[in-house]
Amino acid sequence: MSQENVRAALLKTIGNIQNNPSQSNVVFRASSVLEEDVRCRVQIREFPSFTIDEPPELGGQDSAPNPVELVLAALGTCQEIMYSAYASVMGVELTSVEVSARGYLDLKGLFGLDAEVPPGYKRITFDTRIESQADEETLARLIETVESHCPVLDILSRAIPVSGTASVNGRQLRSLQTSAA
C-alpha cells in the first residue's frame, strides 16, 4: 500500500468517525490455548494461528517468541505503523523507520522469590531510527505526534483497568479486577 493509499484510508476512517462518533469504539480480540509444556497457540481474527513459547530455562523449547518479547514487538511495530500513518496524513516522506526495544525483567518476581519484585518488566526502553529528507522541525512534530498517539506506548505507560475470570470444569472460581492506579 502506497503512502497515498494509507493517507486515503486513514482520512476516510477519520471522516467516518467525525460523521458518526460511535464508530470510534472498537474491540480487539485474541484467543490462545496451552498446547504442551509452556507452548501456546494464538488465534487473532482470521489470520493463521501462531505459536508462543519460552526458552529452555523457562520450561520451553524455544520454538517461538515468548509473551514478554511480543510486548516489545508490539511496541516497536505500533510505533512504526504510527510513523507511517501520521507521515502519510502530514505529507512527510519517510525513507525508513526502525525501532529496537528492550525490556528489563527480574526473574525473582516471575518465580515469586521476592515479594518486592514485580513479575513483569521493571522498565522498557526503545530507540527509533528514522531516515527522511524532511526538515528537523517537521520531523520533531511527527515524533511528538506519534509518541502522544501510539496505542501500545499508551497501554504500557498508563495504568488501565484489567478484568478477567478463571473457570475450572465450566465453573467460575475466580474473578480478577484491577483498578487504574
Image (spheres, rainbow, N blue to C red):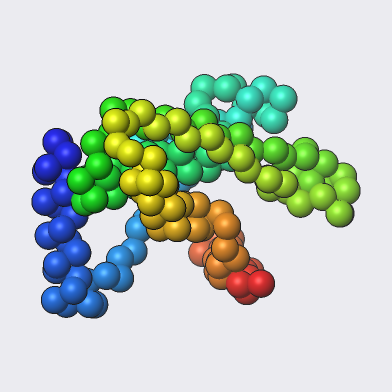
- In terms of depth relative to the viewer, which is nearer, 94 or 72? 94
Task: Name the side, left or right, on which 92 lies relative to 9.
Answer: right
- Residue 62, given in percent of the width and then of the height, sits at 57, 22
Q: Is residue 74 visible?
A: no
- In terms of depth relative to the viewer, which is nearer, 118 or 139? 139
- Residue 59, given in percent of the width and then of the height, sits at 68, 29
Query: Quadrant where the N terminus lies?
Result: top left
Residue at horizontal 75 percent and vertical 44 percent from the top = 110
Residue at horizontal 24 percent and vertical 50 percent from the top = 90
Picture quadrant where residue 43 is located: top left
Query: Quadrant where the C terminus lies?
Result: bottom right
- Residue 75, given in percent of the width and then of the height, sits at 48, 43
- Residue 98, given in percent of the width and then of the height, sits at 42, 30
Task: Name the side, left or right, on which 173 lies relative to 7.
Answer: right
Picture quadrant where residue 14 is located: bottom left
Q: Is residue 168 visible?
A: yes
Picture quadrant where residue 6 is located: top left
Task: Name the side, left or right, on which 35 lies relative to 150.
Answer: right
18 above or below 74? below
Q: How many marks?
A: 0
57 above or below 47? above
149 above or below 110? below
Residue at horizontal 14 percent and vertical 36 percent from the top = 2
Residue at horizontal 68 percent and vertical 45 percent from the top = 123
